[in-house]
Image (cartoon, rainbow, N blue to C red):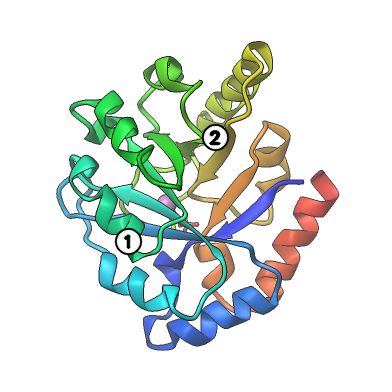
Amino acid sequence: MSELAPSILSADFTHLGEQLHTLEKSGTKVLHIDVMDGAFVPSISFGMPVIRSIRKDCGMFFDVHLMIQEPVRYIREFVEAGADSITVHVEACSDIQKTIDEMKQYRIKVALSVNPATGVDAVLPYLDQIDMVLVMGVEPGFGGQKLIPQTLEKVKELDRLRKEKGLSYQIELDGGVNRENLTKIIEHGTDIAVAGTAVFRGNIRENVRDLQEVIAGAS
Ligand SMILES: O=C(CO)[C@H](O)[C@H](O)COP(=O)(O)O
Ligand SMILES: [Co+2]
């Protein structure tokens, strides 16, 4: 069955601890953590201190999405802060293989991401080395955008490729996920659907329940 990964980008940071407890109590297993550097993407979010702090009191799987230039420089620090999985953008790495090798030194899941304008070709040479491909459904940098429907074709292609090649990487779709489009997203082959706005706007408990119901119905 597919998994929901709430993104804390849309959380209320004055109540972050309580909101994370609510997610855990609602059955959330994977927490999506968006790190932005103001260089690879226009916005700046947060970094290791926030991750280190929430790690102390949170049992969820930390799915860290690095939207930063040359992430190879910071892999060790994010692992030490508590990341369980690290996703880097192929567009942000001058040496993708070196970045994968660096990530593989640690006991974490290794993932590559592609922006809406980047084709699946960019990750093809690495598919047998990685645990997940994150397909951006929106331009990276901001929450609350609308899903670009064409990005689902990449999910479909990655699903086809893993079957054809006998590989087991997961496919994550990030951005613009909501109750209305979630079934379609899953039907294209998504294993993990990231949702920020759709989880944190309004009642978190009800939103998670509703989204999980859609997932259960689609699987
Ligand atoms: O990586 C991201 C933005 O770059 C976020 O994970 C994504 O946008 C989630 O937020 P929303 O569900 O509001 O689109
Ligand atoms: Co993200």
| Looking at the image, residue 51 lies above or below residue 190 | below
Q: CA distance from mark 2 to mark 1?
A: 36 Å
- Which is more toward the observer, 156 or 102? 102
Front tag of 2 and 1: 1
Residue 97: x and y in percent read: 29, 24
Whether residue 144 is visible to the viewer of this picture, yes or no, is yes
For the view shown, which residue lies furthest in the top direction? Answer: 164
In the image, is 176 to the left or to the right of 46? right
Residue drawn at (22%, 50%) of the image:
74
Residue type at mark 2 is: Pro
**How many marks are shown on the rendered structure?**
2
Q: Which tag, 2 or 1, sits closer to the chain's start?
A: 1
- Please rate how many residues cluster around mark 2, counting C-alpha atoms within 10 Å: few if below 14, some from 14 to 19, many from 20: some
Residue drawn at (31%, 57%) of the image:
78
| Looking at the image, residue 175 lies above or below residue 119 | below
Residue 26: x and y in percent read: 70, 74
The residue singled out by tag 2 in the image is: 149
Residue drawn at (77%, 46%) of the image:
1
In the image, is 103 to the left or to the right of 3? left
Whether residue 203 is visible to the viewer of this picture, yes or no, is no
- Please rate how many residues cluster around mark 1, counting C-alpha atoms within 10 Å: few if below 14, some from 14 to 19, many from 20: few
Residue drawn at (80%, 60%) of the image:
213
- Which is more toward the observer, 201 or 34? 34
Rendered image quadrant of residue 61? bottom right
Decide if ligand 2 comes within 8 Å of the CB at mark 1.
no
The residue singled out by tag 1 in the image is: 80
Q: Secondary structure at mark 1?
A: helix
